[in-house]
Image (cartoon, rainbow, N blue to C red):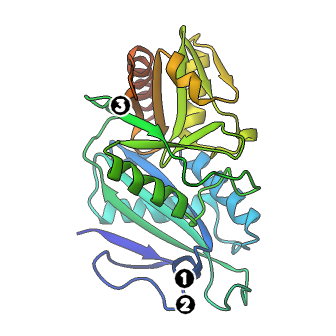
Amino acid sequence: MLFVNNNGKIVPRDMASIDAGSRGFLYGDGVFESIRIFHGAMINFEVHVQRLFQGAAALQITLPANLTSEFLASQCTELIEQSGIKSGGKCRLSLDREAGGAYLPESNNGVYFIEVLPHVDNDFQLNYKGLEIDIYRDIKLQKTFLSPFKTKNGLTKVMASLKAKELGFDDLILQNDKGDLLESANSNLFIVSNGVLYTPGLNDGCIAGTMRMMVINLAIQNNIRVYECPILPHNLLSADEVFLTNAISGIRWVGGYRTKRYQNTIARRLILLLNAFWMKELGQ
């Protein structure tokens, strides 16, 4: 049986668990992190929590003194164990402003919510079939001080995902108002040309993905050059590889954009490095 933790109250997942007046539910007034469970343990937890805390601060959500990284780690670990997740999984950790008020909150105090789910894969796996992608043109992303964080205002990504399904694509790439490619509906974007990685910079307005940073670090440690720079649609046509990254799926290679077809040599190498790194970190 799976469980959730609603601000310290643990209940079965299939029971009602969202409080009346929840601002996260009513207004999207909160931030969240999706954390990969790898061989039964959360990975990259401190990086996720630091981004979570920074996002809460940007939203002017005040956290209780006891809501520390150590406390949240213990709460998440307890929920994983109680839910019986011993291999691959996903932990979603939310910080919302507490109930009260309408667009003007009555309080800025924060509350937390944790849920866990099993994941089909224990290790990170490279997708067998390359993704088919295109560009989402209906809504442009605007760079704001909230752009680096995973806020609960996700309608642009929802609409992009629906459009991808409608058009028969696996994912669509979103642009900023200058026409630069930023990210997909749920992942950061990388392209490879002549063995060099390129990815949009945070200054362009993409999310500060935890897997994005891990891939950058792994690449540099293994003598793969990386540049953060604007990426334009025509760069997709000249790239040798394109892949997408997020904390749960790891690295997913793209097979094609329109008539262009891609390899997956660097993506495959990075998946091996990623698994090796976390196996070593966990002592397995």
* Quarter of the figure with residue 57: bottom right
Q: Nearer the viewer, mark 1 or mark 2?
A: 1
* Quarter of the figure with residue 279: top left
Q: Amino acid at mark 2?
A: Gly
Q: Earlier in the sequence, mark 1 or mark 2?
A: 2
> Is residue 217 in view?
no
- Residue 284 marker: 3
Pointer 3 with pointer 1, Cβ within 8 A: no
Left or right, residue 143 beside residue 217? right
Q: Amino acid at mark 3?
A: Gln
Pointer 1 with pointer 2, Cβ within 8 A: yes
Q: Nearer the viewer, mark 3 or mark 2?
A: 2
> Spatial distance from mark 3 to mark 2, Cα to Cα?
44 Å
Q: Amino acid at mark 1?
A: Leu
> x, y percentage for residue 207?
62, 46
Q: Earlier in the sequence, mark 3 or mark 2?
A: 2
- Residue 21 marker: 2
- Residue 26 marker: 1
Q: Residues within 10 Å of mark 2 (few under 14, many from 20)?
A: some
Q: Secondary structure at mark 3?
A: loop
